[in-house]
Image: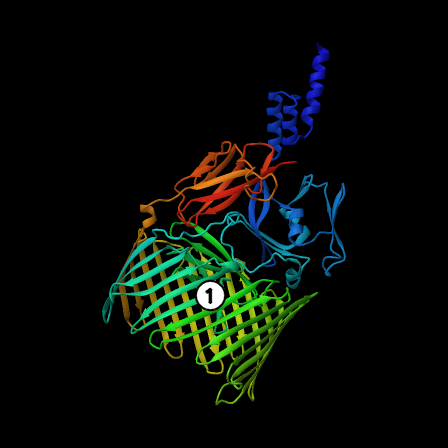
Amino acid sequence: MKKYILLFFTFSLITYSKNYTMTELLQLKKDEKISQIEFEILKNKCMEKKKYVKTLYTLRINNHIISNDYILLENNNDLYFDLFLFLKQIKLENIKKTTENIIINLKNEVNFSDENIVIPLNTNKIYNNKDNIFIRSDYFKELFCNDLKIDREYLVIDLNFKYFTKENIDIYLDSFKKEKIESKSSFYKTSLDIFSPGEIEFNFNKTLRNDYNSWYGSINYKTELLYGNFKSNYDLKNKYFRKTSLSYDNLVKNHILEIDNINIPKNKIWTLNLYKNDGYFEKNSNIIIRVKVPEEARGELIFLNQIIDTAQEKNGELIFKNSLIKRNNDYTIKIYNANGTTDIKHIVISSNDKLQKEKEYEQEGQILYSKNTNKIDGNYKIYYGINNKLTVGAGIIKQKSDYLDGNIIYGENIGNLSYNINLHTIQNTSKSKDYERSIEIETNYKKIKNTAIFKQKSELDKKEESIHYLKSLYYFAENSSIGIYNKKENNTIIMSPEMNSIINVPNINGLISFNIDRFKISSTFSTTYKSTLFHLSGIYDFDKGELDGIFKIAQIRNNFLNYSFLLKYSNKNKLTCELNFSAKYNDWLEIFSQQNISSKTWENGININKKFNLSDLTHNDPVHIIPFVDLNNNGIFDNNEKILENVAIKLNDETKITEENKPLIFENIMEGIPYPMDITLREYGYKAKFTHTIVKKPSSKLLKIYIPMTEDIQ
């Protein structure tokens, strides 16, 4: 008897001391080598050891979006990076794994270092999962990063990779594209309906001023029509349709097509616009950020982790115009929706946004018809990437005369040197002396940036104009530069210093900008305290002897009460002072007041804005979630693949568990609202690509979400 007891304890010691995987345990149980009780004990031991949660993050390296579905492991509040996945993302493939170390050779990958990165495996900072190596975030930062920030609330990783310059990134990261983050749920796609009941909105405004009274009323209707977004606005006071539009926001290559009918007094205008949505556009040498948002949304523009501007939704968009918006910068937009949810979008403003990748293209065009003139004006242009370095552009402009419009754009990176050359010409097709030609050359070498523009312009009956523009900047710190500006226009030469500096001030949670641009000096200070924005800016023009200054205090994060205090000074209008106040009730009633203390004028009023979702009167189809066994690992639910049972899905604070070959059905998921979704596998032996994401239903129709599962072969 003692012999059997001794054998039992010996077997138990050997069995329970070994670290089994779930696949091995299932096989042992299937072969009847362990009992059900032993299986449960070993299973619990295995699961206690493996408390890693997978979450999808957006990965940004040196301000470039590299991936929207990079996976981090979380264990006991520590985050772990998948080493091999990270190296694959940045195209470093010269890797050697031994029993003791991971050796990464940089010599043939970048001309920046000839040394190897050696990562020892015998440390508690690394989770070694046979085929995969996961590195704890603090050790990962020590190995690879100059700076590393992980935002767990909005699921964004920001890192500055120490082995690459900003110019090298474009060479080695082929996956980088100019994009903004719409959502984390990039694993499903859907389209708009040919028709849906839509939404109707009644708007009434009564304003009392010190000199006169006025009122305004409108009915707005929007819906899905012909697989696009249809909007119409009817003016109750003047009794006519002001604007009717049909837009397609998700055409090929992120293009947008808009068809508008606009009624103005004594004229009717039809327009057709085609453009690529990069989240920003340039107007009069200023960069303007424009993003589409739900109605009644509010937004904050964030740069260097500081709020620099705020905006209120208008016509379904947030518009930001700010002197701190410049090229080669990365901005974050925090969007507060009327339903209480929050969205995050990132905008990367590139200096060579017309340079296309190989075989990619960008189109832009406009057609305008005026009933008064009975004429059609317009333009169209396409940019096409011959390869990753060369882009050609060709187009036509039809105004009073017909013009041909052409570009040749070439850009290349050689080590630490990058340069772009843009040749541009516009030529009247019938009159040779009516033209505009220019060449723009931009070079970047380490911290030195040079820009040169040579332009010639000739119009009929006018003397030919010649403009030479040269600028050289030295970046002595991040977002700080000093340089010289030189411009020759005809026989006039202008030369002046230029200085730009943006300083993040952590102790006061603020941002300071200082700029000398030719004969103007400007400075901006922005900071926030709790839910209040403080903004101070000023511009002094030495040439004209004029000063303009603005001081603003504004409430930015209160859905019920909003106020702002504004002080303006200019040589022309002297000092003006404005106080604005508004209060909302139940999202449909607003009382507002605006007082101009300097001119002793005032304006008080009331807004009534009531919406009715006609889709709610008809139906709101559910969401089907289908976790399936991806046998061929192609990410597609094929006919021979089955729905995996015993998977727990939590969506909209409701948890459901799958049964064999039955999708999970979630009701009352409203369109346009982001819902967090968590995935828990209760069927051992399988794994999901991620365990947390965001689901946003684009319309009221049925949405199917497919989640591929693969065998866990740890």
> What x and y, as percent, mark residue 660?
51, 31
> What x and y, as percent, mark residue 303?
52, 61
The reply, left or right, for residue 313 in relation to residue 609 is: right
Considering only vertical position in the picture, is 44 above or below 640?
above
Query: Please, what secondary structure does the residue beneath circle 1 have?
Result: strand
> What x and y, as percent, mark residue 395?
52, 73
Considering only vertical position in the picture, is 180 above or below 574?
above
Q: Nearer the viewer, residue 553 or 1?
A: 1
Question: What colouring style does the render use?
Answer: rainbow
Q: Nearer the viewer, residue 639 or 679?
A: 639
Q: Kindly identify the amino acid type of the residue bearing the numbered disc 1.
A: Leu
Q: Nearer the viewer, residue 392 or 300?
A: 392
On the question of residue 446 being in view, the answer is: no
The reply, left or right, for residue 589 in relation to residue 621 is: left
Instruction: Tell me if mark 1 has few (under 14), some (14-19) or many (20+) residues whose alpha carbon lies within 10 angstroms of its own.
Output: many
**Residue receiving disc 1:** 274
> What x and y, as percent, mark residue 376?
40, 74
The part of the image, by quadrant, that contains residue 21 is top right
The part of the image, by quadrant, that contains residue 421 is bottom right
| Residue that appears at 69% across and 14% down | 5
Q: How many marks?
A: 1
**Which of the image's four quarters has the C terminus?**
top right
Considering only vertical position in the picture, is 430 above or below 538?
below
Considering only vertical position in the picture, is 194 above or below 513?
above
On the question of residue 272 being in view, the answer is: yes
The part of the image, by quadrant, that contains residue 455 is bottom right
**Which of the image's four quarters has the N terminus?**
top right
